Structures are given as structure tokens and as C-alpha cells.
Image (tube, rainbow, N blue to C red):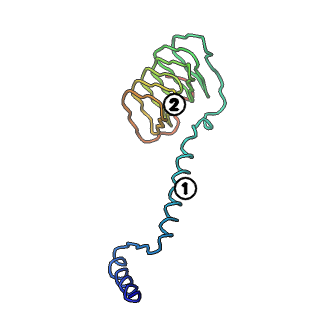
Amino acid sequence: MTRERGRLWTWVVRRFTSSRGIRIVLDRRQGERRQRVQATKEERRLTDRRRPESRDLGEIGGFVAEGIACRGNLHFRGAFRVDSRFEGEHVRGETLVIGEHGVVHAEIQVEVLQVRGQVLGNITAKRWVELLESSTVTGTIRTPRLTIWNGAVFNGTCDMPAAQPPGPDVRSGQP
């Protein structure tokens, strides 16, 4: 009886699986081992994605501290941080970081943007935009790369064109 069962399985495996690329696992332990490996890969994938990309921002060259309210237009080079309220027509520069207590009500045109606070206005970023857990953004985001973390709020539309090399208008601080 066992010998016949073995022949039957051999015939089934050869007949139905070889031409279709299907693998039949007869050993229960192999299937369990495969599931354990897949679970480990899934855990690694999730932990790798939970790191903010702040390591790419560089050194902060200027900032608007908490408790200060500003109006006007903002042009800067390098990295700039806003931890207060800023209202104006536009913000232009290379790297902009909006802190948890930062509120920016303006058009933003930068290479890199990281938001922990609030943005009311349209955003154009040549490299990427990252919306962290405590952020709220209302407006249109135009960037080739967008990261929205769990807990962030985004109300608006998103346009994702192909990545562009840094342009001279952003680096020079000119409109």
C-alpha cells in the first residue's frame, strides 16, 4: 500500500508540476520553515521603512525660532528650519524643515522638504517631500518622491513628475 502511494505521488508530481513550474511540498516541515523565513523578511521590510530621512538634510544654516511670527517672502541657501508661524507669498531654497510647532502659509519651492508641523499652500520639491507623523498639509504637492508617515494628514492633490536635477534658480535664491 505504501509503495503504491509513493508511486502515485511520483506520477502526480512529474505529470502536473514540471510543465507548470508548480512545487508540491510533501514534507510539512519545509512549508513551516518557508513561512518562518517569509515572516522574518516582512519584519525587516517594515523596520527598514520606519526611519525618517532626516539624515539627508545636512546642517541647518538658519531658523525661525518658536514664538516668532514672520510675514514676507523667504529665500535661503542650504538648510533652513521653521519652528513658528510664517505667512507670505513664497518660500524658496534648498532644504526646508518645518518643526512640530511650525505653521507655514505660503507657496513652497524647494529641493527637499520635511514637515512635522502645518503647511497651507502648494509645495513644489525637486527631490522629495516627507510628511512625518504630526504633520498636516493642505494644498497641492508636486514632487518626484513623497513619503507620508502614519498619522500625517494630507488634504489636497499630488503630482509626481520625474526627478529633475537641481536648478540654478533654487541655489541662487532668485525667483
Give the total number of marks visible in the rendering: 2
The quadrant the N terminus occupies is: bottom left
In this rendering, the answer to whether 147 lies above or below 71 is below
Q: At 57% across and 37% down in the image, what residue appears?
A: 52
Q: Quadrant of residue 120?
A: top left
With 13 as the anchor, is 150 left or right in this view? right
Q: Nearer the viewer, residue 110 or 43?
A: 43
> Residue 35 placed where, x, y %?
49, 61
Mark 1 belongs to which amino acid? Thr
Q: At 56% across and 46% down in the image, what residue appears?
A: 47
Say which element carries label 1. helix
> Residue 44 placed where, x, y %?
56, 51
Q: CA distance from mark 2 to mark 1?
A: 26 Å
Q: Residue furthest front?
A: 1
| Marks 2 and 1, the one that precedes in the sequence | 1
Say which element carries label 2. loop
What label sits on residue 17 in the rendered view?
none
Q: Quadrant of residue 140?
A: top left
Q: Evaluate if marks 2 and 1 touch, with contact meaning CB atoms under 8 Å apart.
A: no
In this rendering, the answer to whether 47 lies above or below 94 is below
Q: Quadrant of residue 25?
A: bottom left
Q: At 61% across and 37% down in the image, what residue appears?
A: 56
Q: In the rendered image, which residue does mark 1 sit on?
A: 40
> Residue 86 placed where, x, y %?
52, 15
> Residue 146 placed where, x, y %?
46, 37
Mark 2 belongs to which amino acid? Glu
What label sits on residue 133 in the rendered view?
2
How busy is the neighbourhood of tag 2: few (under 14 within 10 Å), some, or many (20 plus)? some
Callout in the foreground (2, 1): 1
How busy is the neighbourhood of tag 1: few (under 14 within 10 Å), some, or many (20 plus)? few
